[in-house]
Amino acid sequence: MADDVAANQFRVVMQRPRLDVITGEVTPEVTPEVARLLSVLQGEMTRAGLMAALRLSDEKHFRQQYQQIAVSMGFVEMILPEKPNSRLQKYRLAAAGRARLQALNPLERP
């Protein structure tokens, strides 16, 4: 009888999102593009400077796949958040970006 019960059972295995050890919050996945952006961002940089460091020429692609995602995830911050379209706008690593960069490259020191 025990064999009949075991034959009719099944198991579902689901992967849970990783939790941040310090805060207990769900850790967002970093796309390869955002990881590249974080790795080249030094101090405060303009959009053109970031694109040059990444060797990109398509502004739309950079904006959609790198910049907007990194800013919306809180990894990169604008120095003039009240003026997002300013010609003087620059970007810098936010605290979350520094922590994520350290997690991506644990052997390197920020």
Image (cartoon, helix red, strand yellow):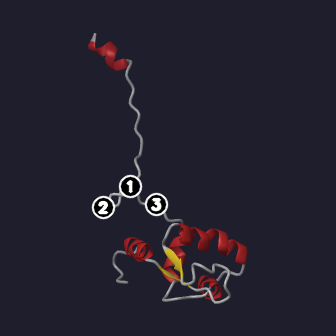
In primary-sequence order, the first of circles 3 and 2 is 2
Please tell me how crowded label 3 is: few (under 14), some (14-19), or many (20+) other residues with Cα within 10 Å. few
Q: Which mark is residue 48?
A: none
At which x and y percent is residue 56?
Answer: 67, 80
Residue 104 sits in which quadrant? bottom left
At which x and y percent is residue 26?
Answer: 40, 56
**Element under disc 3:** loop
In the rendered structure, which amino acid carries the disc numbered 3?
A: Pro
**Depth order, front residue of 88/109:** 88
Residue 100 shown left or right of residue 84 in the figure: left
Q: Is residue 46 above or below residue 84?
A: below
Query: Pointer 1: what residue?
Result: 18
Query: Pointer 2: what residue?
Result: 21
In the rendered structure, which amino acid carries the disc numbered 1?
A: Arg
Please tell me how crowded label 2 is: few (under 14), some (14-19), or many (20+) other residues with Cα within 10 Å. few
Label 1 and label 3: CA atoms lie apart by 8 Å
**Element under disc 1:** loop
Please tell me how crowded label 1 is: few (under 14), some (14-19), or many (20+) other residues with Cα within 10 Å. few
Residue 27 sits in which quadrant? bottom left
At which x and y percent is residue 29?
Answer: 48, 61
Query: Pointer 3: what residue?
Result: 28
At which x and y percent is residue 43?
Answer: 48, 89
